Image (spheres, grey):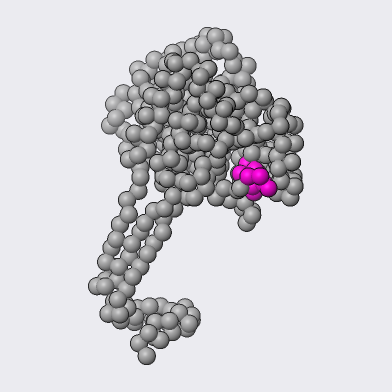
Amino acid sequence: MKFVELNKLSSSEKEYLLKRPSINIEETMDIVKPILDSIKSAGHVKVIEYAEKFDRFQGEEIAVTENEFFQAESVLNKEVKDAIDIAASNIRKFHEKQYPANYEVETMPSVLCRREFRPIDSVGLYIPGGTAVLPSTVLMLGIPAQIAGCKRVVSCTPVKDIINPAVLYAAKAAGIKELYKVGGAQAIGLMAYGTECIKKVDKIFGPGNQFVTAAKTLVSIDPDGCLVDMPAGPSEVLVIADETANPAFIAADLLSQAEHGVDSQVILVTNSRSLIEKVGEEVRNQLEELPRKQIAAECLKNSLYILVDTIDDAIEFSNNYAPEHLIVNFENVDERLKQIINAGSVFVGPYTPESVGDYASGTNHSLPTYGYAKAIGGVSVEMFMKSMTFQKLSKEGLKDISNTVITLAQTEQLDAHANAVKVRFK
């Protein structure tokens, strides 16, 4: 990891630190767009072709069968099933509180305005599976969709031959019945455009690599495509700590994100030079014990130790960076949480590792990256719904508001708008 002292940098150098590891957007788009175009025009045969090419899929049918769900439950050991059940229960408890409330307001006498929520009819969930199996993401996306009341929930994940039983068990826990063994941009194309065999969805959710993110971006601006939740890309974590923090804890937190992928980014911001030295030693020691140490080591090349003068400086940097995951581990931390304004999910204190949010605390782990936490939060029940507004006026109510509407319509030179009110009183 690189070491920098924030107070010795110029404004432009500080700005550069906020950038994520470089991704060649044009090159990625050039790879992804032909895949989407061919699925859009040729349909199912192209989905299978790309699944074989990129996922190394082997088989004739990408749809998961009822028998595969049954077999998964029978072969999965009880410890894993219990863990999935507990995680699902916690995620459900937290997300049930998010169900939005309808309301009605009488803005003027006999002018009634109402807001109501409806579930999105058909949604698609992307479950990454390139370098790791992620049943946790199945729960994080499937359970909010279930709570929202979406009628059709489609899920896609890359599979070479046999789908991981933990993924299938998690899918069952989340109420997902329609699951396809396809990943990458081809999965996004399948869900966004549909084929002669599979109907398209109205909105796609889920994180993924740069190709998945590019595909989600492209289908979201195509009138024939669909909406997406957010461009959730490579994972990232920022840790703010002082000299009271345990170096082993911090090193473990940094490595837990570094093992996600070589394009992930991990950052420690602290006012203690000695803590950086101790964390660096712990990172080196713990890294050697990780099965995915090559991936983590590559990620660390793009990652940072940042020395600041004060914890206030650290919080300011974090707010500018707007991390996907923010771990805060310093004295009087609870008193300073109001200073944090930009982060996807915040982990408070020495005994709140980021991994609890990834799996089982109850909060959602599908979160904004690339600094988008400045403008959007993580996946929630509301994201699987849309609001509709209603208004109903009596004749008296329309009469009371008519002059206001007519005046504004005439100010905008939209006389037909004004006439729509006038004609009702002729």
Name the image quarter holding residue 329: top left
Q: Is residue 145 above or below residue 239?
A: below
Q: Is residue 418 left or right of residue 54?
A: left
Image position of 102 with respect to 410: above or below: above
Q: Residue furthest bottom?
A: 426
Residue at screen point 48% across, 82% down = 416
Residue that sits furthest to the left in the current view: 109
> Which is nearer the eye, 181 or 319?
181
Instruction: Name the outermost residue toward the front.
Output: 67
Viewed as shown, does residue 333 lie left or right of 71? left
Q: Which residues, given as a range, are shown in magenta?
A: 188-198
Q: Quadrant of the C terminus?
A: bottom left
Q: Position of residue 118 (x, y in %)?
A: 41, 53
Q: For this rendering, which residue is in front, 158 or 149?
A: 149
Left or right of residue 95, residue 231 in this image: right
At 66% from the left edge and 44% from the top edge, which residue is drawn?
Answer: 197
Residue 193 falls within the magenta-colored stretch? yes
Visible residue check, residue 246: yes
